[in-house]
Image (spheres, rainbow, N blue to C red):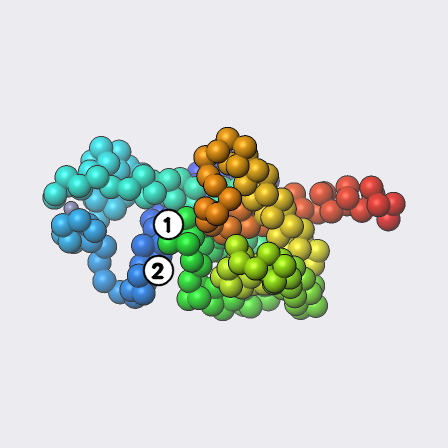
Amino acid sequence: MAEKFTLLLALLLGAVLGSFLNVLIYRLPRGEGVALGRSRCPSCGEALRWYDLVPVLSFLLLRGRCRYCSAPISWRYPLVELLSAGLALAVVWRWGWGMMALRNYFFLACLLVASFIDLEHYIIPNRLVLGALVGAVPLDYMARDPGLVPALLGALSAGGFLFFLALVSRGGMGGGDIKLAAVSGLFLGWPLALLGTFLGCLIAGVWGIILLVTRRKGRKDHIPFGPFLSAGLLIALFWGRGIWQWYASLLGF
Ligand SMILES: [Zn+2]
């Protein structure tokens, strides 16, 4: 278990990385370059200074408004920074400083970006899935987890499961969801990727029933699946082994 000081460091690092995730969330679905160009206010176009971009703090000090034009800043910015800080803290807490923590933070960051883009635009961009894929190969290799065969089995089972659901349900499940589930297999491996994808469907199903019963949404309204899939995969990453063993013992294995 990591020392208190290094946990604080993980929290701060996660918040800083979170502001980069905000850039990805804004630029990826708009087809903009992710590395070049300074951040600008989406309302007035003013280039933001470093002191406008301090994670969480700038938002609080500016009381959620642009320094130059006073347009409200989306709550998404501090929220993503806080979530990223929490994820970084969680992986260092669980795996200590090392390749496993780095690989798993990268995975969770991809899920975070996919979820917020899906919530706003109802898509999971190919560039994001491709980025996750390109990152997975060297990070898996360096973390020595989950191994080549489990990774491929994880990708096939999770992607195949969603592909099957998409065929049966005729829509509702997008191509981006299927690709994201398949790439998640490279990070989680067999059987955790399939378990996480299944949990995502379960959570989405329960949420859909709640919305129908409370009449917040009709049967035809579109609910993005990305955040649910991500939640299921996150649960599988942290607690999947235990859940899988419990399930196997129920079946008498
Ligand atoms: Zn502005």
Q: Amino acid type of disc 1?
A: Glu
* Circle 2 Cα neighbour tier, 10 Å, few/some/many (<14 / 14–19 / ≥20): some
Q: Residue at x 17, y 41 (%)?
A: 71
Q: Residue at x 51, y 66 (%)?
A: 133
Q: Position of residue 221 (x, y in %)?
A: 45, 46
Q: Amino acid type of disc 2?
A: Pro
**Tag on residue 29?**
2
The residue labelled by disc 1 is: 120
Contact check, label 1 and label 2, Cβ < 8 Å: yes
Q: Secondary structure at mark 2?
A: helix
The quadrant holding residue 25 is bottom left
Q: Residue at x 48, y 47 (%)?
A: 220
Between residue 222 and residue 198, name the one nearer to us. Answer: 222
In the displayed structure, would residue 85 be above or below residue 40?
above
Residue 166 in sight here = yes
Q: Position of residue 3 (x, y in %)?
A: 53, 38
The quadrant holding residue 154 is bottom right
Q: Quadrant of the N terminus?
A: top right
Judged from this view, the residue extending furthest toward the top is: 214
Q: Exactly how many numbered labels are in the figure?
A: 2
